[in-house]
Image (cartoon, rainbow, N blue to C red):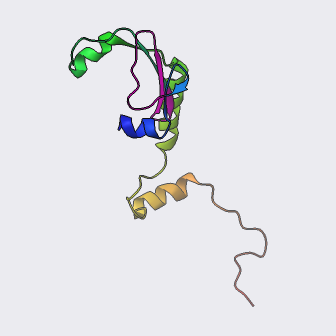
């Protein structure tokens, strides 16, 4: 996944586009886009050997601004009121709830009468 992102120029190290073989050093800033926000990671140290995923946080610091996470939360909340994809047509109950929620159209004089 990371190799593909590097090839598509989605990852930068210290403001420069990174290749998959790019070495990183302490104090390097890695910037990438994930979940519709730009994440900023600072490398604190390089481990001597491979480490498990639980220990990776020791060697990096997340410098992503808090506003970015708040913006992501607002995006998620704004999409919740839409119907989920693949749920099909609204049920009879859903339709009645929608009709109750939406304002009913008002008929002006002459509309709705039988044609003569």
**Closer to the camera, 105 or 81?**
81
The N terminus appears in which quarter of the rendering?
top left
Instruction: Identify whether 82 is placed above or below 71.
Output: below
Instruction: Identify whether 35 is placed above or below 39.
Output: below
Residue extending farthest right: 109
- In the displayed structure image, the side of residue 28 where residue 1 appears, left or right: left
The percent position of residue 43, horizontal first and vertical second, equals 40, 13
Identify the residue at horizontal 38%, vertical 29% (top origin).
21
Identify the residue at horizontal 67%, vertical 62% (top origin).
105
The percent position of residue 24, horizontal first and vertical second, equals 40, 18
Residue extending farthest bottom: 116
Identify the residue at horizontal 48%, vertical 41% (top origin).
8
Identify the residue at horizontal 59%, vertical 54% (top origin).
102
What number of labels is visible?
0
The percent position of residue 89, horizontal first and vertical second, equals 42, 64
Quarter of image, res 103: bottom right
Instruction: Identify whether 102 is placed above or below 67.
Output: below
Q: Give the extent of the magenta segment.
A: 18-38
**Closer to the camera, 102 or 110?**
102
**Closer to the camera, 5 or 65?**
5
Look at the magenta stretch and give its main secondary structure: loop
Q: Is residue 34 on the magenta stretch?
A: yes
Q: Is residue 115 on the magenta stretch?
A: no
The C terminus appears in which quarter of the rendering?
bottom right
- In the displayed structure image, the side of residue 46 where residue 95 appears, left or right: right
Quarter of image, res 23: top left
The percent position of residue 44, horizontal first and vertical second, equals 38, 8
């Amino acid at each position: 996944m990371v190799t593909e992102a590097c090839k598509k120029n989605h990852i930068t190290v210290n403001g420069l586009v990174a290749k998959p073989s790019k070495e990183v050093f302490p104090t390097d800033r890695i910037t990438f886009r994930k979940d519709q926000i730009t994440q900023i990671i600072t490398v604190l140290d390089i481990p001597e050997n491979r480490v498990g995923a639980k220990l990776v946080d020791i060697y990096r610091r997340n410098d992503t601004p808090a506003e970015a996470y708040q913006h992501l939360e607002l995006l998620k909340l704004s999409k919740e009121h839409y119907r989920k994809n693949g749920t099909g047509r609204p049920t009879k109950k859903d339709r009645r709830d929608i009709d109750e929620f939406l304002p009913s159209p008002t008929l002006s004089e002459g509309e709705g009468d039988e044609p003569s």
